[in-house]
Amino acid sequence: MTPTATAPLAILHEVFGYAAFRDAQADIVDHVVAGGDALVLMPTGGGKSLCYQVPAIARHRAGRGVAVVVSPLIALMHDQVGALEEAGVHAAFLNSTLTLDDAQRIEREMMGGRLVLLYAAPERVTTPRFLAQLDSLHERGLLSLFAIDEAHCVSQWGHDFREDYLALNVLHERYADVPRIALTATADDLTRADIIERLQLQDARVFISSFDRPNIRYAIVEKDNARAQLLRFIHDEHEGEAGIVYCQSRKKVEETADWLKSEGVAALPYHAGLDADLRRRHQDRFLREDGIVMVATIAFGMGIDKPDVRFVAHLDLPKNIESYYQETGRAGRDGQPADAWMAYGLADVVNQRRMIDESPAGEEFKRGQRGKLDALLALAEAHDCRRVRLLDYFGEPSQPCGNCDNCLNPPATWDATESARKALSCIYRFHQNGGQRFGAGHLIDVLRGKATDKVAQFHHERLSTFGIGADVSEVQWRAVLRQLIALGHLRTEGEYNTLELTASAREVLRGDVAMLLRQASDAPKRKKAARVERSKDKAPPVKLDDDGLERFAALKAWRAEVAREHNLPAYVVFHDATLAEMARSQPESLDALAAISGVGTKKLEAYGREILRVLEAGPT
């Protein structure tokens, strides 16, 4: 194989050390290399980066110059460029972290066509100065392709809308003959259509990979002291492992991180309100150290390539299924078992509904957002397979997975139709009795017949509905109200979230709406045998004997030194799977080492002899 090979498969093997493309990668790469536009929907961990990196290398070697990658995150740019340089591909980024001298040097390399890939943020790409540079490259035939990563950011329907992305249609208008590839890990039909229209990709070929991540176990529990539930989940399932905990507010992020630290968990906070340097340090620690738990708002996560995140937990309900899928997809990128765990309750439903209703957006947009929230609530309340529901949202048929909480421990259900009618009837009587409105807590007290001061103050013990729901627990009543709000039969009003009937409540009161709810319960306790099996998650991804485990540990120690010297996360040097295969097969020559997946030509030249030395030293 020559270092100037332009065939995609040859590049994949030479540069990245892989023998074959996965799934749709080969078709995507061939299409873009040939000059076609593409919209690629591929799950997190599915190998999206290779879909533009391999074409960029192929077209550069064919004399087509530089590929421009539009990326929204500085951290992602740094790690992607570091990984490419490690693999022998000349890449760079332009962002605010560079000195003027460094930025000018990179621009000279770009204008000379020497760079293979240049990463830049959308707000930079669309400046007059940068466009003038692109004009010059284009005139000289040195603009090979545009890759627009996280393309859902262009859509008002997407979960990470960014206004800077809207101006990217200029790329098609000015450089219509330069291929463009837009990539995202998640987009429903509305978002896909928006991406195509806003980026003018009407003639692009659309590639949709399976959204299934079979290694992720989905579990959703009802809140009952959410902090204690989270701590139990971490201690029981993921002691000492890397994870992400998402919270809705900055305050909750900081409080949760401090509390986890006080409970012995290595936790760090991350949100947009923190100092930029502190955010960078925390993100670097998460990427480079083992066992860090990042507690964050949704400001954290886009483009995070860390492969060994063993869990993603939500302490608050996301806005929609796209957000949930994108965030949970940051777990288990290495293909090893991982968990997506979420706790939610009535307050989550109320808060999300209120945020939609009070937003300044138009009514059409609000209707769309309510529909997306309804789909997420249906997933949370489901008593059948979570994965089937999740994939169905993205238009992908599937069978029960056998690996979500509902499949592993099918929940008991109960007919809540009559209870729903009683709740709405009680609210109606509040209105008749002086027109007052009350929140969920007081409503439940009246239904259960509790003689509180508030009940006495408003004489609600005289209502015909007082005590008619004494046989239903408070937890069950909250599930009923959660479902009524989710279905739009109730809405909340004002600062105190008082409950108000909607027009559709009449259908429930008439008995026309059946409600079958899951019995309230915490996450199922795993059997001891299952926990022992899952405790092996920290082990190498291939089976090793005792000597092999010692070789694996030695290789990891060597890799850590190299990563520190190069200021890169360890996985950028080699993934665990590659080190484990080295430890298992014990190659004794550079040729044998080159046959291992993940060992490209440049890494073989840079590290091959050192790796053989570590392996030759053997177990101590």
Image (spheres, helix red, strand yellow):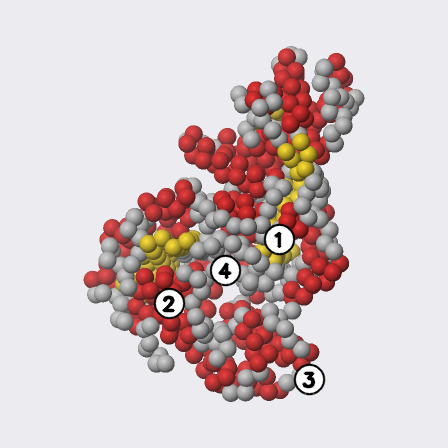
Q: In this orientation, which residue lies closer to the viewer: 177 or 456?
A: 177
Q: Gap between marks 1 and 2, in whole Å?
A: 36 Å
Q: Gap between marks 3 and 1, in whole Å?
A: 42 Å
- Mark found first going from the N terminus, 3 or 4: 4
Q: Residue 331: x percent and y percent?
A: 57, 57
Residue at the location (63% across, 73% down)? 543
Disc 2 vs disc 4: Cβ atoms closer than 8 Å?
no
Q: Quadrant of residue 465?
A: top right
Horizontal relation, residue 316 to residue 263: left or right: left
Q: Amino acid at mark 3?
A: Thr
Between disc 3 and disc 1, the foreground one is 1
Tag shown at residue 45: 4
Horizontal relation, residue 280 to residue 344: left or right: left
Q: Amino acid at mark 2?
A: Val
Q: Quadrant of residue 149?
A: bottom left
Tag shown at residue 620: 3
Q: Amino acid at mark 1?
A: Gly
Tag shown at residue 54: 2
- Mark found first going from the N terminus, 1 or 2: 2
Between disc 4 and disc 1, the foreground one is 1
Tag shown at residue 402: 1
Q: Gap between marks 2 and 4, in whole Å?
A: 17 Å
Residue 284 in sight here: no
- Mark found first going from the N terminus, 3 or 1: 1
Q: Gap between marks 3 and 4, in whole Å?
A: 36 Å
Q: In what element is the residue under mark 1?
A: loop
Give the quadrant of the N terminus.
Answer: bottom left
Q: In this orientation, which residue lies closer to the viewer: 567 or 407?
A: 407
Residue at the location (20% across, 62% down)? 139
Q: Residues within 10 Å of mark 2 (few under 14, many from 20)?
A: many
